Amino acid sequence: MATAAVQLDDKVTSFVAKKQKLLINGKWVDAASGKTFASYNPATGEVLANVAEGDKEDINRAVKAARAAFETGPWSKIPTSERGRMIWKLADLIEKHLEEFAQLESLDNGKPLKIARVADVPLTVNHFRYYAGWATKIEGNTIPLTGPPQGKFLAYTLREPVGVVGQIIPWNFPLLMAAWKLGPALAAGCTVVLKPAEQTPLSALRLGELLQEAGFPDGVVNIVPGYGETAGAALAAHPDVDKVAFTGSTEVGKLIIQAAAGNLKKVSLELGGKSPNVVFEDADMDSTIPGAASAIFFNHGQCCCAGSRLYIEKKAFDKVVEGISDNASKIRVGPGLNPDTDMGPLVSEEQLNRVCGYLESGMKEGAKAVTGGTREGTKGYFVKPTVLVNTTERMKVVQEEIFGPVVTAIPFSDPSEIAATANDTIYGLAAGIWTSDIKKAHTLASKLRAGTVWINCYNVFDPALPFGGYKQSGWGREMGHEVLENYTEVKSVCAAL
Ligand code: ADP
């Protein structure tokens, strides 16, 4: 943890130093209450920035602005090609400011700068570009009616924007999650109130400046940082919001559904996971071992799809555990801004305590850490990459989402039972399969109750590929053309001729 951190871009230093405001109706404003909250640097635990604290009244104002922009503002009339052009321009602007965003993301979330530079920011740019293309391709159908004689009716469907959308996002990929939500909503012609996570509001606020520069009219995207129980809850419950899109924990997902019931707003949810990652003994171990390590340790295990339950065929168990543990012990843990850091701190003290709590509970129940198992250092929120063995199916560390760099490695001897074991979870977000046998791979893929199955790879994301959960991992899909269903209504028009 010794190397000097990179020099911060001047724009980042001044952005972080200024008091951050809310973006409502194209204006940067203080919270109605005048309150602010602190965003912390997780590498040091020190205050990084002060941010206006949005609450119910601010959400009311933002929804009002979004409603006006949707119903009567210039956005409601602009050609779809213009909508696409603005989204593309936004992508260009983010790309132009790539280093600035990467630094902000590293400072606020803790992730290694070198990862934010090659993953978070470029993926965000690519995501917006993909949805820029969709703006001009959202279509209905003409539908021949089956009962009346032909030629008596003209019937067709229109796919229209769902309206004012509330979007509530988490802290693990702050900028990318904003893009996952905003890209399709804007392509579909919706207007938005976005609430970033209270731990990581900065990149969304900088994005707000670029949305303005890209030419989005006032009120099309409003950004209201604040706490979940206040601003988030007000947005989910708001009677004039047509749809809420949420990414976060399953527990909060259930609260969102309850809050949305008041006006039966549409709901889409991308929630937690406890993804099985299955290694067969015939797998190519040179790629499997680093692949399975990255499946859990990427982004410090703070991924809803992290491959946190590793099932290894018995004959390969010792080799794979040793390989992954060796891999884990070589991960350089340190502040995200240090050039040689591979893994930064967890996002907050709360997460640190949560992950350490799971480690203690696992050990108490008889699990053993082959490597890691504790916090790293005493300053900042660092946890050592950890491989646990000697676990049993019902232990909390095997059943519950830890959201940290902790994998449970479990041997299996009967391949015919692995699908049932892998599916033995309330979640169904993702799964991994490692084998050289193509038949085995696809047979297991068909049996897994998960929204994404990776074969001989993991964490491969693409804006064209749908992502979302079976079971308690969510409702609906992000990405691909599937996500556009979340942001459109279908209208059937039937005319007698
Ligand atoms: P985590 O436990 O990983 O922090 P959460 O599900 O608590 O994830 O948070 C994800 C997002 O949901 C954040 O933007 C947070 O502010 C918001 N949130 C938390 N609680 C609520 C709530 N009761 N209603 C609406 N949003 C909430």
Image: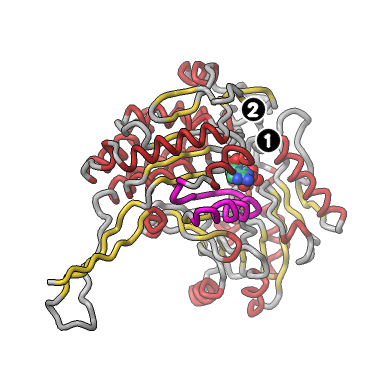
For ligand 1, give the image quadrant: top right
Q: Position of residue 29 (x, y in %)?
A: 47, 23
**How many badges with numbers are in the image?**
2
Q: Is residue 22 above or below residue 135?
A: above
Q: Position of residue 10 (x, y in %)?
A: 47, 16
| Range drawn in magenta | 240-264
Q: Position of residue 101 (x, y in %)?
A: 46, 30
Q: Is residue 113 visible?
A: no
Gap between marks 2 and 1, in whole Å? 8 Å
Would you name the residue on which mark 1 appears?
A: 348
Any magenta on residue 248?
yes
Tell me where residue 411 sits by quadrant: bottom right
Instruction: Report the amino acid beneath label 1.
Output: Ser
Q: Secondary structure at mark 1?
A: loop
Any magenta on residue 258?
yes
In the rendered image, the quadrant that contains the C terminus is bottom left
Q: In the rendered structure, are the residues bearing label 2 and label 1 in contact, judged by CB atoms less than 8 Å apart?
A: yes
Q: Position of residue 203 (x, y in %)?
A: 49, 31
Image point 16% across, 71% down: which residue?
Answer: 496
Question: Considering depth in this image, is 489 or 97 the residue closer to the camera?
Answer: 489
Would you name the residue on which mark 2 appears?
A: 40
